[in-house]
Image (tube, rainbow, N blue to C red):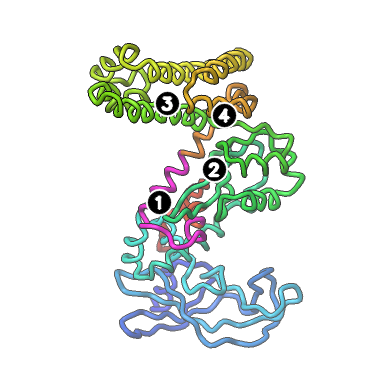
Amino acid sequence: MRMTTLLKKLLGIQHLLVTGFALEEGALVIEVRPSWRAPRCSGCKRRRGRYDTLPPRRWRHLDFGGVRVYVRYGLRRVSCRVCGVVAEAVPWCDCTTARFTTPFEEAVGFLVQRCDHTSVQEMFRVAWVTVGQIVERVMQRHRPDDPLDGLMAIGIDELSYRKGHQYVTTVTDQLSGRIVWAAEGKNAATLTSFFTELGAARCAAIAVVTMDMSEAYITVVTQQVPQAQIVFDRFHVQQLVNAALDETRREEWRRLRTVDEQHAKTVKGLRWALLKNPWNLTPTQSQRLSTLQQDNSRLYRAYLLKETFAGILDRHQPNVVTDRLNAWLSWASRSRLPGFVKVARTIRGHLSDIVAYIRWGVTNGIVEGLHNKVRVITRRAYGFHSASALIGMIMLCCTNIRLRPPQVRLAQ
């Protein structure tokens, strides 16, 4: 078997011919060319007339037994009636500006989905920033042609990726459980750009939008998709009530400490006992809560408000939930607990959208689960310095893209 034939089989790339090879600076450089003679436009893939020839360029390929491998070729430029003067298409790389072959980038993308950037960088001997650039190209290669098509139920949330309040807004398809859009920022302009990209026709098809109680998001959704039902996630609504309970606990601690230090100790260390579900309490915590009514009636009232609210949201009849929430709001407003008075005012203003959680049965649970995955990715990469690098990783790992390691099977 000729050496050029063996190298062609080892490269494992279709429509490629090996014309020679050389050892340069400890690396194997393989001279290649496309198997077709007439150059093809890299844009429309049609055969076009040659315009000129560029100096030889090298593309990094997968190593052979730990030895660096490059393929080298002098790209021809073509004059295309549609795309203009552009570089020709080559079978080993689908991006004319990249310096890596497609199998190399696929291998990088496969490992990035499963381990940290530093390990990938060391294994493939490329720069840390280069890993992020490869991820963006792999994501563009494998993502659906139109990820925004067919959206009916979406979840909107923001994600912090660096200190200093740097955020990324994500939109998740509730039906498929994948992130379909992400952009830097968490303000109204950021979300407006999503609906602008979606278009009026596809905006009209959206029936449900789940989110937290961000005023900026509420305003944009109301303006852009007025027919859609806003559903406030139960977790965020319950979080408001829990925050009011914790605020009451801190107020009671400060008040009692100035009056009777010994009496103040009765509410010391009760935070987690108050916030836990009753069935998760330890025996010690249950013992302390059993005497809370005698020790501190205000804190006991706040605890009852929190547990009653959780019980209401456990019901499955929207009309019953509406009636009971109205009764709860009246109780909270008269409770003389500033934290609950404020929460009652907030919930009353969004009552129909909170009850919609019962009617539609959707939450931001899928969105929060994907964000936990993104946080692991961010931690695994030890922080991203740009939003574009993080968005590339989000789209690679949270959009159901399935990569396989490039494997070459030698023909007999």
Q: Name the residue carrying label 2.
A: 157
Quadrant the N terminus occupies: bottom left
Q: Name the residue carrying label 1.
A: 377
Q: Residue 272 colored magenta?
A: no
Marks 3 and 2 sit apart, C-alpha to C-alpha, by: 25 Å
What residue appears at the point 56 percent right and 68 percent down from the top-left corner?
A: 94
Mark 4 crowd level (few <14, some 14–19, many ≥20, 10 Å Cα):
many
Q: Are marks 3 and 2 in contact (CB under 8 Å)?
A: no
Q: Nearer the viewer, residue 339 or 218?
A: 339
What amino acid is labelled 1 in the image?
A: Ile
* N-term-proximal mark, 4 vs 3: 3
What amino acid is labelled 2 in the image?
A: Asp
Tag shown at residue 253: none
What residue appears at the point 49 percent right and 52 percent down from the top-left corner?
A: 394
Residue mark closest to the camera, 2 vs 1: 2
Tag shown at residue 245: 3
The stretch of residues the image draws in magenta is 369-391
Left or right of residue 223, residue 113 in this image? left
Q: Residue 347: percent from the left, percent from the top?
A: 58, 27
